[in-house]
Image (cartoon, rainbow, N blue to C red):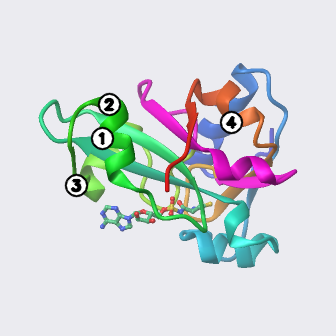
Amino acid sequence: MSKSLSPSAIKVQRALIEKGFSMEILELPTSTRTAVEAAQAVGCHVAQIVKSLVFKTKHSEKPILVLASGANRVNEKAIEALIGEPLGKADAEFVRQQTGFVIGGVPPLGHIQPILTFIDQDLFQFEEIWAAAGTPNAVFKLTPQALPEMTNGEIIKIT
Ligand code: 5CA
């Protein structure tokens, strides 16, 4: 494990190792806070970036994590139909409280608690994709097939 990673990126590296994965986290000198910035930083298409979008269920106020292709906009109605509850807004504080990470660095795994997760089927057209790794400068490369294994997420059409 690299000694130069920040504490939040180390949390993600540990979570990967605990699940038996060997992907290596890269902490970059440039921002990977948004999907566009992350794509520029690693030199891939924006659609190959995994956006980690946190929603809040309107009544039960539970977090929902949607792992979306960077090119896609989430159709909230599709998620609401699956969970049987409307979605409300998740603000930055809710995201930090529920995941343990700041917006722009929310990873697919390694959260404070398990979070119900949905995975965008469009990510599976690529051989490799990139996800956030705990900070707005940290990412890791993975295969789409690894995502359901590391998150127990359900693969759905999110658009
Ligand atoms: N590091 C990159 C991908 S490697 C990343 O995290 N991208 S992201 O798209 O998953 O994270 C940024 C997302 O955070 C935005 O798409 C947006 O939905 C959300 N966001 C940004 N600002 C706020 C805010 N103030 N409140 C709630 N959500 C926000």
In this view, which residue lies farthest toward the left? 59
Q: Are marks 4 and 1 in contact (CB under 8 Å)?
A: no
Q: Identify the mark nearer the N-term, 3 or 4.
A: 3
Residue 141 vs residue 75, the one in the foreground: 75
What distance separates the C-alpha of mark 1 from that of mark 2?
Answer: 5 Å
Between marks 4 and 1 in the image, the one whose residue lies nearer the viewer: 1
Residue at horizontal 62%, vertical 69%? Answer: 32
Residue 15 percent location from the top left of the image: 64, 29
Inspect this view and state whether residue 88 appears. yes
Q: Is mark 3 within 8 Å of ligand 1?
A: yes
Crowd around label 4: few <14 · some 14–19 · many ≥20 (10 Å): many
Q: Which residue is mark 1?
A: 80
Query: What numbered label is drawn on residue 83?
Result: 2
Crowd around label 1: few <14 · some 14–19 · many ≥20 (10 Å): some
In the rendered structure, which amino acid carries the disc numbered 2?
Answer: Ile
Q: Which residue is mark 4?
A: 147
Residue at horizontal 54%, vertical 69%? Answer: 33
In the rendered structure, which amino acid carries the disc numbered 3?
Answer: Lys
Residue at horizontal 76%, vertical 72%? Answer: 45
Query: What numbered label is drawn on residue 159?
Result: none
Q: Which residue is mark 3?
A: 89
Residue 149 percent location from the top left of the image: 69, 25
What distance separates the C-alpha of mark 4 from that of mark 2?
Answer: 20 Å
The part of the chain drawn in magenta is: 108-131
